[in-house]
Image (tube, rainbow, N blue to C red):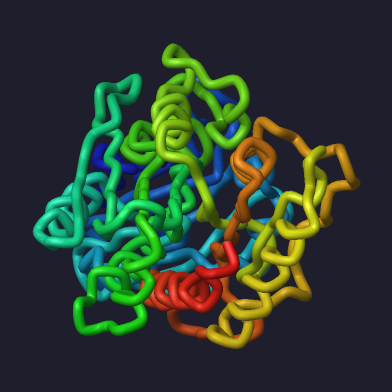
């Protein structure tokens, strides 16, 4: 038996690994940070062997309620990720499995590797609708990729979308695959009409270093990028600094920041209600987008979500608040679950990459319905 995590986005520490019936593990903390919750590792050499795995330090993780009613993700082929019944006693997370093959992977959610990210950039680059560029580099020297979609006359709306400020929220880049599929389908008349009116600036992965290192929430320096928007520097948070500079160069009419939420088993949007310069138009656009998305996708809802900020109390270090305040635009944070969508549960796969892609398509479809209102 062997337990390994020395690969892209791997994260686990083995406490006891000599008895399949009593495997004990810890999740490693994020780089230069006390955050931890993301895990990703491989168990091998135990085909047809009953195994019990326990994460000992789950009770000290960043979002302890996230373990309640959670089911671990598992895969033999690293493509299809199914769920395994999992228990949490307030301190330890554990599950039992009898692997059908010699190699079985486990993760907090279906991983999205930097290799797959590179494949995504290479694939979309082949479209005549796309221009790709590198805005600069991370602290680990990785590329900060920007994908621009749609080219035409001046005056089109500047649409910005970004994912994975928090690298462990891999559902956000699965969502990006669906959004890009929708936009680049030349047989899609809605996408064609939308691109006549909009120029897209897309950052599929805001945090390459955290993604490769197997972090939940931070970059290589330990910075939570979604608390850096009004104070970013090249020394601590070059990812935000570089993207923000490009945004100020282009202007922004719409921004969607794509995330995952550990606790709530729903898809929902967080807005910018507490910004100092909130306008009636911004509030109406926020309500319009959510109402339309509810009609287009049964996976979206408005009943469950975060509490809204009181007027004038918004934290402007957060991306959505910074964007809405700075550009006066419609800016939103889309949250997807690590668990499942309790309104439409899937007992075998939970919330999955496939459903993330579908929601990505629905979100672009929603934008197309209201592009003239921006």
Q: Residue at x 41, y 39 (%)?
A: 250
Is 263 or 304 nearer to us in this picture?
304
Where residue 30 appears, as percent x and y from the top left, is: 49, 31
Where residue 245 appears, as percent x and y from the top left, is: 43, 27
Q: Residue at x 53, y 51 (%)?
A: 253
Q: Residue at x 45, y 77 (%)?
A: 365
Where residue 238 appears, as percent x and y from the top left, is: 41, 22
Q: Residue at x 41, y 40 (%)?
A: 206
Residue 123 placement, left or right of 188:
left
Is 291 or 2 nearer to us in this picture?
291
Disc tally is: 0
The quadrant the C terminus occupies is bottom right
Residue 348 visible somewhere in the drawing? yes
**Residue 270, image quadrant:** bottom right
- As drawn, the residue found furthest toward the front would be 154
- As drawn, the residue found furthest toward the left would be 126
Rendered position, 224 above or below 319: above
Is 242 or 116 nearer to us in this picture?
242
Where residue 146 appears, as percent x and y from the top left, is: 29, 43
């Amino acid at each position: 038996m062997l337990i390994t995590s020395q690969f892209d986005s791997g994260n686990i520490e083995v406490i006891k690994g000599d008895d399949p019936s009593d495997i004990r593990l810890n999740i490693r903390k994020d780089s230069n940070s006390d955050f931890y919750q993301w895990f990703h590792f491989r168990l091998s050499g135990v085909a047809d062997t009953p195994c019990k795995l326990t994460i000992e330090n789950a009770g000290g993780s960043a979002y302890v309620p996230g373990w309640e009613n959670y089911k671990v993700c598992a895969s033999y082929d690293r493509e299809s990720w199914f769920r395994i019944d999992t228990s949490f006693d307030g301190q330890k997370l554990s599950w039992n499995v009898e692997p059908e093959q010699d190699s079985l992977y486990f993760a907090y959610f279906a991983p999205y590797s930097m290799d797959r990210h590179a494949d995504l950039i290479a694939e979309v680059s082949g479209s005549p609708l796309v221009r790709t560029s590198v805005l600069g580099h991370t602290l680990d020297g990785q590329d900060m990729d920007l994908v621009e979609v749609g080219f035409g006359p001046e005056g089109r709306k500047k649409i910005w979308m970004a994912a994975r400020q928090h690298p462990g929220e891999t559902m956000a880049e699965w969502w990006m695959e669906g959004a890009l599929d929708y936009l680049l389908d030349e047989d899609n008349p809605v996408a064609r009409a939308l691109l006549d009116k909009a120029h897209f600036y897309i950052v599929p992965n805001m945090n390459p270093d955290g993604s490769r290192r197997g972090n939940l929430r931070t970059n290589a320096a330990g910075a939570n990028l979604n608390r850096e928007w009004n104070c970013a520097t090249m020394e601590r948070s070059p990812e935000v600094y570089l993207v923000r500079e490009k945004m100020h160069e282009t202007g922004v009419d719409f921004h969607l920041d794509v995330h995952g939420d550990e606790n709530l088993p729903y898809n929902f949007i967080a807005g910018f209600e507490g910004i100092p310069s909130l306008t009636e138009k911004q509030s109406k656009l926020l309500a319009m987008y959510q109402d339309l998305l509810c009609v287009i996708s049964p996976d979206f809802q408005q009943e469950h979500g975060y509490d809204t900020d009181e007027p004038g109390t918004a934290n402007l270090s957060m991306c959505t608040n910074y964007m809405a305040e700075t550009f006066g635009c419609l800016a939103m944070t889309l949250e997807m679950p690590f668990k499942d969508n309790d309104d439409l549960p899937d007992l075998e796969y939970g919330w999955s990459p496939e459903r993330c892609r579908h929601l990505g398509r629905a979100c672009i479809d929603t934008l197309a319905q209201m592009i003239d209102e921006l």
